[in-house]
Amino acid sequence: MQLIDPNHPAYRRLWVRIAIVAVCFGWATVEIIGGDPFWAVISAGAGAYAYYMLFWSFNPQPEVAEPAAVPDADDDEEPAVPAADKPSKDGQVD
């Protein structure tokens, strides 16, 4: 079971990955100072797991481009042409 999906687009930025790990280890420090070792170990474990997933085994996949929309073949409308490129009545382009 994977708790952190390293291929999620939210983790592409380095500062986001650093912030997640720093908050986990920072909270572990707060719990140690507060005298609660149980929650300190839990927070440090979350930080270690986040570090492993977001830095050690992080291998971002390239983004897949969306295919361009293909117009319908039965579309009877003419494509938009700028007014400067439209031929005049005598067939000349202005």
Image: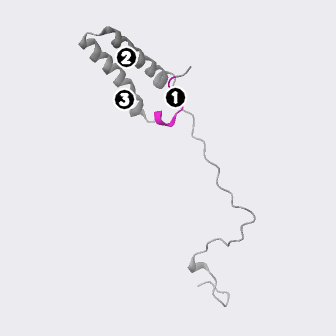
Q: Left or right: 2 with respect to 78?
A: left
Q: Earlier in the sequence, mark 2 or mark 1?
A: 1
Cα–Cα gap, marks 2 and 1? 20 Å
User: In the current view of this chain or complex, which residue is farthest to the bottom?
Assistant: 90
Instruction: Please state which amino acid type lies under the numbered disc 1.
Output: Pro
Instruction: Please state which amino acid type lies under the numbered disc 2.
Output: Ser
Secondary structure of the residue carrying numbered label 2: helix
Cα–Cα gap, marks 2 and 3? 14 Å
- Residue identified by numbered label 2: 43
Bounds of the magenta span? 3-11
Query: In the rendering, at what x and y percent does residue 78 appear?
Result: 67, 73
Number of marks drawn: 3
Mark 2: few/some/many CA within 10 Å (<14, 14-19, 20+): many
- Residue identified by numbered label 3: 19
Query: In the rendering, at what x and y percent does residue 56 appear?
Result: 48, 21
Cα–Cα gap, marks 3 and 1? 15 Å
